[in-house]
């Protein structure tokens, strides 16, 4: 069995990574999550499908590569004071920028990204300062959660940008909403991580991570939940010695 876990540089070597994924289709060894799932999840325009299905997402404008877009005009039309721009294929907040309306230089940042990438323009939600939730599921069953809190003055929650991760049980209503998102995926999933902001008892989806997430396996319970999911894939009952 091949378990694809943390290829955190795949977007920097995308052509090479895509060829490797295709090569996995030629072997009989099971791959989790599957190549089909990974290829669907690589490009963050998948968020369109959730929005169409009525699942709340962080308000987003999806811009195709090389499509001429006036960023200040977008912010004005959406009545957003700030926004986050990022490539549709990326990870670890790579090439992710926080911009403000009428800020000098913001257009050049967007133009540079659009020169060779599809781009997401997302409303900046101030509540991110209080933390972004990550809820972990194994075999589509809820396991555990973590709250990712950015350092003061920063909007990115990743540890490489100074963010801190706190193991914390998510509110029941938040878990229920995340479960609906995971259940909406028809494919089998060894693991899934639902990332989002919880506002007024509503989960606003930021990303559904099915390819390269940190699974926050820092507690014995989380570790055993993942191990048991692996054992079931291998044909062992979790209660076996």
Image (cartoon, rainbow, N blue to C red):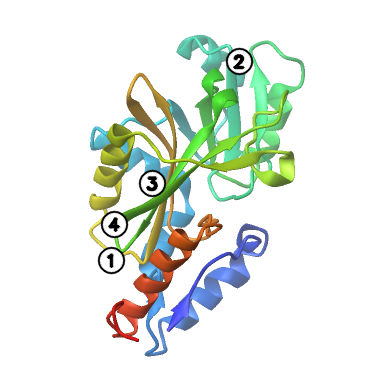
Q: Which mark is residue 141?
A: 4
Q: Earlier in the sequence, mark 1 or mark 4?
A: 4
Q: Which mark is residue 72?
A: 2
Q: Is residue 224 above or below residue 78?
A: below
Marks 3,2: beta carbons within 8 A:
no
Q: Nearer the viewer, residue 72 or 166?
A: 166
Q: Residues within 10 Å of mark 3 (few under 14, many from 20)?
A: some
Q: Earlier in the sequence, mark 1 or mark 2?
A: 2
Q: Which residue is mark 3?
A: 46
Residue at the bottom extreme? 28
Marks 1,2: beta carbons within 8 A:
no
Camera-side mark, 1 or 2:
1
Q: Which residue is mark 1?
A: 188
Which residue does the image show at 60% across and 17% down from the upper left?
Answer: 82
Camera-side mark, 4 or 3:
4
Q: Earlier in the sequence, mark 2 or mark 4?
A: 2
Camera-side mark, 2 or 4:
4
Residue 5 visible in the shown view: yes
Give the CA distance from mark 1 to mark 4: 12 Å
- The image shows residue 72 at horizontal and vertical percentages of 61, 15
Q: Is residue 22 above or below residue 10?
A: below
Image quarter of the C terminus: bottom left
Q: Earlier in the sequence, mark 3 or mark 2?
A: 3
Give the CA distance from mark 3 to mark 2: 25 Å
Marks 1,3: beta carbons within 8 A:
no
Which residue does the image show at 27% across and 46% down from the upper left?
Answer: 179
Give the CA distance from mark 1 to mark 3: 17 Å
């Amino acid at each position: 069995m091949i378990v694809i876990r943390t290829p955190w540089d795949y977007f920097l070597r995308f052509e090479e990574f895509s060829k490797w994924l295709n090569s996995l289709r030629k072997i009989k060894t099971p791959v989790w999550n599957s190549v089909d799932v990974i290829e669907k999840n690589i490009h963050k325009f998948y968020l369109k499908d959730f929005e169409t299905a009525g699942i709340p997402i962080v308000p987003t404008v999806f811009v195709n590569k090389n499509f001429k877009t006036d960023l200040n005009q977008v912010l004005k039309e959406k009545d957003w004071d700030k926004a986050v721009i990022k490539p549709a294929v990326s990870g670890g907040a790579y090439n992710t920028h926080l911009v403000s309306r009428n800020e000098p230089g913001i257009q050049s940042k967007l133009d540079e990204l659009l020169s060779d990438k599809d781009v997401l323009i997302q409303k900046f939600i101030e509540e991110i300062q209080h933390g972004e939730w990550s809820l972990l599921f194994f075999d589509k069953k809820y396991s555990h959660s973590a709250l990712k809190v950015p350092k003061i003055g920063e909007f990115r929650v990743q540890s490489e940008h100074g963010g801190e991760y706190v193991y914390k049980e998510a509110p029941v209503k938040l878990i229920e909403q995340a479960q609906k998102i995971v259940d909406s995926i028809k494919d089998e999933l060894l693991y899934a991580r639902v990332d989002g902001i919880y506002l007024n008892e509503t989960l606003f989806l930021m990303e559904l991570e099915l390819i390269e997430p940190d699974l926050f396996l820092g507690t014995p319970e989380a570790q055993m939940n993942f191990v048991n999911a692996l054992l079931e894939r291998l044909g062992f009952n979790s209660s076996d010695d």
